[in-house]
Image (cartoon, rainbow, N blue to C red):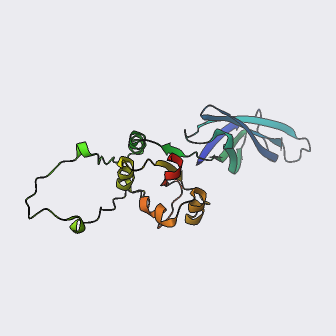
Amino acid sequence: MNEVYVLDKEFLFKNNIHAITSISLEHSFDVDDSKVIGEFIISGDYRLHEVSINKEDFSFKVPFNNEVRSNVNLDTVEVEINDFSYNVNEDELSVHIEYLVSGEQSLIEFAEESDLEEFLQETDAEVIDLSEENRTEEVKTPEEVKTPEEEPPVEDIRDEEGINKEAIINNINSEESFITYHVHTVTPIDTVESICSKYDISLNDLKKLNNIDELTINSKLIIADEEAAS
């Protein structure tokens, strides 16, 4: 998870000021349930007049509150400041804060077909039901009946994220195997080789269920783990 947020805030001084002589930005936060709750502290000092040697201190607080995705490990959540800028106009201080909320996403496991279908529906994907009772049988004439050698190969149907859902559901429906599926969200440091190494799978197994020609950050890869279910 890598979410960027922006805060723009204005603060009023008691008097018109000549110049900000120093300014700093600090922050603190806590993770409560599925939220990051914290505050930015803007502090420093300023001069009221050009010729004045006296400085006045100031300090302002800016609270923030952001949701954390349900599959993020809360112990890994961090808040980092990407950009901070300010502007002074007479008695007003305007600040611009851009910050990043990051965290490691946990794996989602599917032990049953219903779990996988629920995940695909929540991600606005089409669920392909290939169970025997939902297939429409067609009556064929003897001329239309083909031997197994003549049957065309199963079409490799992949969605927009490159996930081969038909192959996944075929595996789940198979009576000969029971497979656990992981969903891996691609991060900026991921490579095809590192993903294969992390899940101890071959390149061919990864290609069976996913389009890996071009890895995109935050895209999802389906990983089949037959050993976990044995």
Q: State whether residue 194 is above or below residue 181.
A: below
Residue 45 appears at what percent x and percent y? 84, 42
Image location of residue 54, percent across then percent down: 91, 41
Give residue 55's position: percent from left, percent from top: 88, 41
Note whether 204 is above or below 52 in the view shown: below
Please give left or right for residue 64 compared with residue 150 in the image: right
Task: State the residue at coordinates (43%, 58%).
Answer: 209
Q: Is residue 198 visible?
A: yes
- Where residue 14 sits: x, y (%)? 77, 32
Comparing 213 with 172, the one in front is 172
Dividing the picture into quarters, in which one does residue 189 lie? bottom right
Residue drawn at point x = 72 percent, y = 42 percent? 90
In the image: residue 83, left or right of residue 221 = right
Task: Between residue 177 and residue 118, name the one nearer to us.
Answer: 177
| Residue at image location 21% in from the left, 68% down from the top | 150
In the current view of this chain or complex, which residue is farthest to the right?
53
Looking at this view, is 226 or 127 the one in front? 226
Nearer-the-camera pick, 150 or 207: 150
**Total marks drawn?**
0
Can residue 12 be seen by looking at this rendering?
A: no
Instruction: Answer left or right for 224 relative to 26.
Output: left
